[in-house]
Image (cartoon, rainbow, N blue to C red):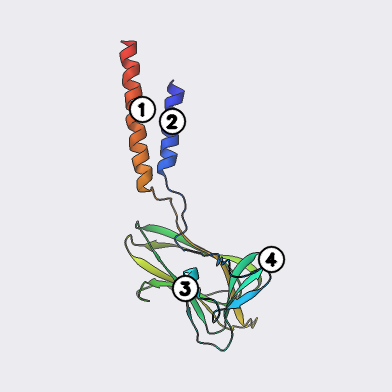
Amino acid sequence: MRKTLTAIAAGLLLAATGAHANLVTNGTFDSPDISTGSFSTVTSLSFSDLNWGFYSGGSGVTKLVDNGGNQFAQIASGDILYTSFSVATSGQYNIGFDFQGSGLWGLTGSSWSPEVVAPTYLTPSAGWTSATGGPVALVGGDSYKIYFGSMVTPPQFYSTLSLDNVSVSAVTPVPEPEGYAMMMAGLGALGLMSRRRMRKAA
């Protein structure tokens, strides 16, 4: 019986702990409107539908590309893609993404200030590379913008920055309100079971 109670308590604690949830909506750039092996430019596909914003400052064409069913954004030199997200709980957060080509990334407040992570240049890469940033201290209740820009930098003069799997997640999982409620209900049930046991023993 004691083992059962211990197992139940452990399960409740696990349920109360939140997962490493990604705060970025559609960091994988999934879109059902793009067929396999094709692409769509931002002029024919609204990035707002993907929860991403777009600034054009270059002469190239920023687009959403599908490579064998895997979709990613390809940012033309001089252009910027950005997305907003909100933080529920203050704490340390990790940033991750995959990229190919050359460019930069940064993190700001929701109105493009204050600067949280200064524009950070990426080491040019011919193949897909995983990059991480942080941990970064973010404030609960605040909103932020993470942005990516493409620019030609030496010694490899790539004219685009390809981007995929963008994520912002808590370093330590944050307990969710539903988890707390479940844990409290479970502890109450454990208390009742323990009280019944004591009465039977008496």
Find residue 95 and report its horizontal and vertical position in percent: 48, 63
Q: CA distance from mark 3 to mark 4?
A: 24 Å
Residue ranking furthest to the front: 33
Q: CA distance from mark 2 to mark 1?
A: 8 Å
Q: Residue at x 69, y 70 (%)?
A: 37
Dot 3: element: helix
- The total number of labels drawn is 4
Q: Identify the residue position indicated by label 4 in the image.
A: 68
User: In the rendered view, does 1 fall on the left or right side of 155?
Assistant: left
Residue ranking furthest to the bottom: 59
Upstream in sequence: badge 1 or badge 4: 4
Residue mark closest to the camera, 4 vs 2: 4
Q: CA distance from mark 1 to mark 4?
A: 51 Å
Upstream in sequence: badge 1 or badge 3: 3
Upstream in sequence: badge 3 or badge 4: 3
CB under 8 Å between callouts 4 and 2?
no
In the picture, the disc for residue 8 is: 2
CB under 8 Å between callouts 2 and 1?
yes
Q: CA distance from mark 3 to mark 2?
A: 44 Å
User: In the rendered view, does 16 fall on the left or right side of 60?
Assistant: left
In the picture, the disc for residue 48 is: 3
